[in-house]
Each structure stands twice: as structure tokens, then as C-alpha cells.
Amino acid sequence: MDWKKILIGKWSWKRPFYSLFWCYVLLTFYGCFMADNIIFQPPGTPYPKNRAGFFSIGKGHEAVAIFHLKPGPEMPTILWSHGNAQNLKSLKPALESFHIKGFGVISYDYPGYGESDGEPTEKGCYEAIEKTYRYLVEDQGVAPEKIILVGQSVGSGPTCWLASQRNHHSVVLVSPFLSAYQAVTHIPIFPGDRFPNHRHLKKVNSPLLVIHGEEDQVVPFSNGKKLFELSPATDKKLIAVPKAGHNDIFLKGDLDLSLIFLEMAAK
């Protein structure tokens, strides 16, 4: 019995192309059904006992958990979209440090994160940041030109989307990707991609700052550099942090974000 023929089949010049085709189909289906489980990694960290600044906007399954501290006189408000393995608890110390300097700060948890209900999806993240923005502008009376949009890693997705939809002052992207798939594939070869930042940012003319580690193994530096190049903004800056990866960018970069935000606000 010819086991090789049974297991492999008869060789022909078409076989490699068939194999590539079926590999592509399988990877496409895998991406469509499993991408959200890979992109979003909600930590199980509960919120602190000190609930100052924590509350929810909206009701029921559409409620979005936020952390908000108001700005000092004439100071801007930072709307921060966090990374995929963070929630408001882990981001709270950084936000409080900016508030001490006089900034208003607000962040929100994606669906399925912290005390935000639901399951994390691209659409759900867009809805969550939209509700947070509307709360600032409509309920708190914050002028759009006083809002600095900040997105870190997966947070660059909702940030770039909101920047293309709503008025704001400026945009800061930390370790951003061109799109969720392109952080891995480098080129757009699969359908069903998530967070097409490269398309959204082309519609944004406000001042832009991109900060990216040159040794980032999660989202390659080329992603941040390409987004910077694609931006039509006339006032834009790229900070490449030598020897920094994805999670140590602030440590390796020795960056004073408060000073950076003040410089952005002055534009």
C-alpha cells in the first residue's frame, strides 16, 4: 500500500497553490471568529475601594464605566483610551498624576472590561468612546478644542476613529498599529480586519504626536512610522524611542507626558 500517495496525494504543479488557497481560507475564518479574543485581553483586576472619580454613564447593558477628574482653570482634558490588558484600575495612577498638574482626565473601559457590560468588539469600543466624548461635551460643557485624544496600543483604534468623526484639539498615539491585522501581517491581505487606523487618520488634520518604541515586538515600529507618514496634518511629530519595546516605552523613553501634553495644548 502506497501510504505516501494516500496521505499526500498525487503530486502536481497545482498542489502548492491549492495548499496556499486553503491555508488562506482557514486563516480568514480563524480571524473572523477569533480575532476579538486575541485583540482584547480584559484583566480581572477589580476597581479600588476608593471610588472617587469612578462611575458609569448610560444604563443597563449599554452602561460604560468611566474615570473622570475635572481640569483646573484654562487647562485641557485628556481623553485616554487604554491598552488591551489594562482597565481603569491600572490606568488610575497615571491619570491622577496628570490631574495633579492641572489637566482634566477621563478614560473609559471597553465593553467587557472592568465594570463596563457586554463583550469587547470594535463597534463596542467605538460606541464607548463616543459616549464618553458626548458626556464631556454635552453634560460637562467641555469645549471640543480643549480635548486631547490619547490612544495607547489597541486604544489607538477608537482614538483614530473618534478623531475622524468629532472635533477635538489634537491626537497623541502611543505604540499604535496601522490596523489590528497589519500589526502581524504588515500588509492588508485578509478581510475582516479590525480598527483600520490607516484609513481613519487620513481624515484627521489636527496636530498629531506619535510615540513608538523602536524595538516593539508586539506592534512593530513601522506601524507608528507609517501612520505618521500617512497623516495629512501639517503639525505632526514622531518620537522614536530607542531600545524600547511595547510595554516599557515610558520607562525606556524617560518621557515627561505632562510636559508633552502642555506642548500639545499650546498648539
Image (cartoon, rainbow, N blue to C red):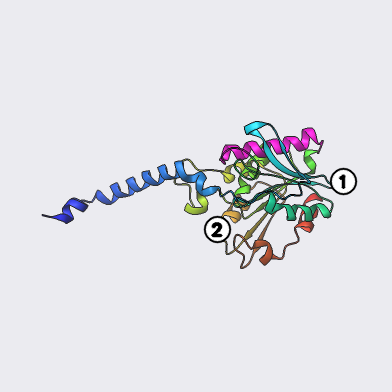
State the residue in front, 199 or 216.
Answer: 216
Rendered-image quadrant of the N terminus: bottom left
Between the residue at mark 1 and the residue at mark 2, the CA separation in whole angstroms equals 37 Å
In this image, 213 relative to 69: left or right? left
State the residue in front, 242 or 89.
Answer: 89
Q: Position of residue 97 (x, y in %)?
A: 78, 56
Whether the magenta-drawn stretch holds residue 138 is answered as: yes
Q: Is residue 110 visible?
A: yes
- Dot 1 crowding, Cα within 10 Å, few <14, some 14–19, many 20+: few
Whether the magenta-drawn stretch holds residue 255 is answered as: no
State whether residue 139 is above or below residue 205: above
In this image, 184 relative to 264: left or right? left
Q: Which mark is residue 42?
A: none
State the residue in front, 77 or 224.
Answer: 77
Q: Position of residue 216 (x, y in %)?
A: 57, 61
Q: Amino acid at mark 1?
A: Glu
- Badge 1 marks a residue whose secondary structure is loop
Chain part drawn in magenta? 117-142
Q: Position of residue 256 (x, y in %)?
A: 76, 61
* Figure quadrant of residue 146: top right
Seen at 77% across and 52% down, the residue is 264
Q: Is residue 11 visible?
A: no
Residue corresponding to mark 1: 74
Q: Amino acid at mark 2?
A: Pro
Residue situated furthest front in the rendering: 49
State the residue in front, 59 or 49.
Answer: 49
Residue situated furthest left in the rendering: 1
* Figure quadrant of residue 31: top left
Residue corresponding to mark 2: 220
